[in-house]
Image (tube, helix red, strand yellow):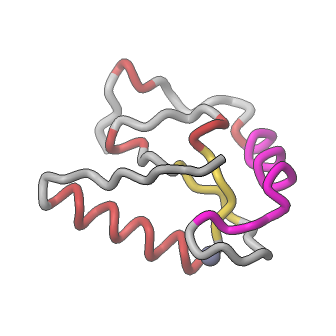
Amino acid sequence: MHTSARNQVRPKDHNARRARVLRRYHGVCYWCGSGGASHVDHVHEVADGGTYAEDNMRPIHKDCHREKTSAARRARAAGKPLRITLRD
Ligand SMILES: [Zn+2]
């Protein structure tokens, strides 16, 4: 996967960030709105220029993550990268 220079590298404390994000949002999946999420997603895909910053990270279910990733891939292939507006 190509990562632009602007786009940093995966931070060393990524696992700690994931844990903080899960706690902060009480495991509520930003994709479907239900609780019990254990994965963390980069809302604005890193492949689309998103960052590894915590404000770009939200809890997501494993299945929702798969769905979102494929939606982002399709959007990217169509030349219209996915843009998601967060309310918080
Ligand atoms: Zn979900």
User: Does residue 61 lie above or below 81 as drawn?
Assistant: below
Is 45 colored magenta in this rendering? no
Q: Is residue 21 above or below residue 6?
A: below
| Highlighted range, magenta | 15-30
What is the quadrant of residue 32 in the picture? bottom right
Secondary structure of the magenta portion, mostly? helix
Q: At which x and y percent is residue 75?
A: 23, 61
- Tell me the quadrant of ligand 1: bottom right
Seen in the picture, residue 10 relative to 57 is either above or below; the reply is above
Q: How many marks?
A: 0
Horizontal side, residue 81 vs residue 17: left or right:
left
Residue at x-position 29% and y-position 38%: 2
Residue shown at 23% from the left, 67% from the top = 74
Image coordinates of residue 6 in percent, x first then y, are 38, 19
Is 20 a magenta residue? yes
User: Where's the N terminus, which quadrant?
Assistant: top left
Is 23 left or right of 35, judged from the image as shown?
right
Indicate the quadrant where residue 20 lies.
Answer: top right
Residue appearing at x 16%, y 59% in the figure: 77
Q: Would residue 26 be found to the left or right of residue 34 on screen?
A: right
Residue at point 42% right, 48% down?
Answer: 45
Which residue is outermost to the top? 6
Residue extending farthest left = 78
Is residue 40 rendered to the left or right of residue 24?
A: left
* Residue 47 position by quadrant: top left
